[in-house]
Image: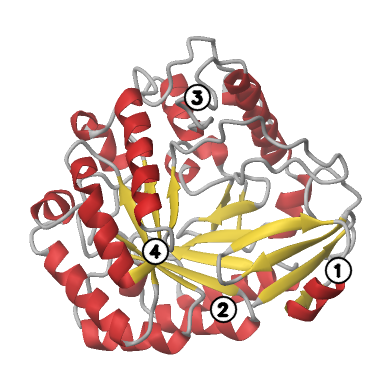
Amino acid sequence: MIIFREEKFGGILFDTETMSYKFIESLSCEESAKIGRMIPAFPGCERRDIVSAPIQVYIELTKKCNLNCRHCFTGAAESDSEGEPAGVWISILDELHSIGVINVRFTGGEPTVKTGWYEILSHAKKLGFAVSLQTNGVYADADDTVKKIAGLALDQVTVSLDGIGRTHDELRGRGAFEKLMASMKLMKAAGIKLRFNTILTKANSAEMPQIFDIVKEYGTAVNLFYMRSLGKGAGNSKISLDFIEHAESAKQALELWKKYPEIHVSHSGFYSPKPARKRNPEFPDVSFPYGNIAISISSDAGYWPHHYSIYQGENFRLGKYPHDRVIDVWRFSKKLDGFRRWLLSLRERCEKCIEYRDRCSGINFEMEIEKLSGRSASNPFCVNSAPASQPLEYLED
């Protein structure tokens, strides 16, 4: 389905099949005929440098998790709190719907261990959102959980696959791979087409061909990205790829994509070898999503520029439900505007680097935060020696 949201510059077309969007100045007859839902712009925004409201919102439904992954950037565990009750999330969804948010993406922890998760996602679908679920695929009752997921008719279900057999288990726990495969077989039988997330490591990068075989069998897309040295991942730098290895894995992924052209492949090392197309000056500058087309809501109902920043310091917190409205934070938060300016400064630094659009696709903002905070000695995915601006210079209220 195509969802259209009005904006001062024209509007946003969101494709629920690919979960992608584009800005347009006006609707063509062909585009109009494909629209399944139209959203008026939320009134009162005079700014032209941002879209009128977030296009998508990442919702960390709970920090509680049934696995104890070595590389988890959130540090999620079974002992963690479930977070806010279901009624709060239903109220938040009502607010997001009222301001014209198009896409809500449920993450965790593991969302399916949250009490009331099915009711929450059902409400999101009832409101007309494009709904995504990020899950580890390991369930106490796989038959029941998969049946519920299938019944929701979600627009996207993403599972985490971090290697084959023992490689996956070494990161996520003994038996995790077998349980994931069993769940995926049930999902395939139920007609659920999966998207895969793979965190690249020194062990699983060699298994990329086998990973692509599984993706072809059970899904339509795979997203391969670097390991964030956050949470539990901070203590596992030895298994992370370095800059050169990551660039090489991007080349390997491109070759596999040629073998499986029907699969949509994303890689955090992909880049365009040609200069980017000149941006339309009438459109807001949203060349990266963090705080520009998306924000995140943590399990305690706090607002953040991105779901990594939740775990990188309270100074990134933008507000909290119900004390603050999402739309007010989006339009008027000086801290969020500061975050946006900081990202622009990082982009300018990237664009001057000889590796940019050669072996590097650009900003690894969360790793720059770790380096600048002193928690990490370096950003392993960046070889740019030019000094980076401090985020705190921009985040003062």
N-terminal of the pair, mark 4 or mark 3, is 4
Q: Amino acid at mark 1?
A: Ser
For the point 48% across and 78% down, which residue is it?
A: 154
Asked if 19 appears above or below 226 in the picture, the reply is below
Question: In terms of secondary structure, where does tag 2 sit?
Answer: helix
Asked if 55 appears above or below 243 in the picture, the reply is below
* Quarter where residue 43 is shown: bottom right
Name the residue carrying label 2.
124
Q: CA distance from mark 3 to mark 2?
A: 41 Å
Question: In terms of secondary structure, where does tag 4 sit?
Answer: loop
* Quarter where residue 127 is shown: bottom right
Q: Amino acid at mark 4?
A: Thr
Q: Nearer the viewer, residue 390 or 251?
A: 251
Q: Nearer the viewer, residue 314 or 143?
A: 143
For the point 41% across and 78% down, which residue is it?
A: 117
Closer mark to the observer between disc 4 and disc 3: 3
Q: Amino acid at mark 2?
A: Ala
Q: Amino acid at mark 3?
A: Asp
Name the residue carrying label 4.
62
N-terminal of the pair, mark 2 or mark 1, is 1
Name the residue carrying label 3.
358
Closer mark to the observer between disc 4 and disc 2: 2
Name the residue carrying label 1.
28
